[in-house]
Amino acid sequence: MFRWLSLGVLVACLGISVHYRRRARIEGGTIPRAREDPLFIAARIAVALPLWLAIVVYVSNPRWMLWASFPSPEWLRWVGVGLGILSVPAAYWVFSSIGQNVSETVLTKEHHELVTHGPYHWIRHPLYTMGLALLGGIGLMAANWFILLYCLVALIAVRMVVIPREESALIATFGDRYRDYMGRTGAMVPKLMGRS
């Protein structure tokens, strides 16, 4: 059952992502990946590929991922189901809010807009938050330490490497407007009492 729930939320979120990313390419153009640092691209692949392969293998045939399973209480697997289900409307909210500004790179588009509505009113990078919640939810549903470990690696990489690079590009584009926005929002969770 958890395998099918994992597959359902994964397909729903990917469907939303593909739809909005396709629209963004048509309406806002694309940024060639070649403009990014090759080492940065290689590091992204090194983190993302094992995570996505593990999830695909799990939903294809859970027995192939038994080597990484751990004895999980059923309630914890249901917490994963909750995270996964909440990720679907969150994906819609994030992608419909960011619109044509969504990109597969950390660079800004030529006609990039500073989005501060929807979830972006409170969080500067809700796309990363939503994606990691989805993947972590699948890891909990699968009771799979490998998927959860790579979610943690992805979280650290996003927070320590990806977000600083992306925010440098946004500061270069929007200057003080983006610095002010940073001052009143959290990076991946809402800012509480002056702290992110």
Image (cartoon, rainbow, N blue to C red):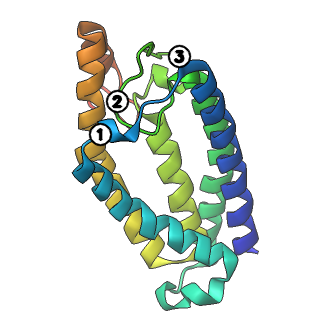
The type of residue carrying mark 3 is His
As drawn, 126 above or below 78: above
User: In the drawing, does residue 122 fall left or right of residue 75?
Assistant: left
The residue pinned by badge 3 equals 117
- Mark found first going from the N terminus, 2 or 1: 1
User: In the drawing, does residue 62 fall left or right of residue 179?
Assistant: right
The residue pinned by badge 2 equals 107
Residue 134: mark in rendering: none
* Callouts 2 and 1 close, C-beta under 8 Å: yes
Tell me the distance, in whole angstroms, between the alpha carbons under discs 2 and 3: 20 Å
> Percent x, y for residue 121?
47, 19
Mark 2 or mark 3, whichever is nearer to me? 2
Q: Residues within 10 Å of mark 3 (few under 14, many from 20)?
A: few
* Callouts 3 and 1 close, C-beta under 8 Å: no
> Percent x, y for residue 28?
54, 20
The residue pinned by badge 1 equals 36
Look at 30% across and 42% down and name the residue there: 162
In the rendered image, is residue 153 in sight?
yes
- Mark found first going from the N terminus, 2 or 3: 2
The type of residue carrying mark 2 is Leu
Quadrant occupied by the C terminus: top left
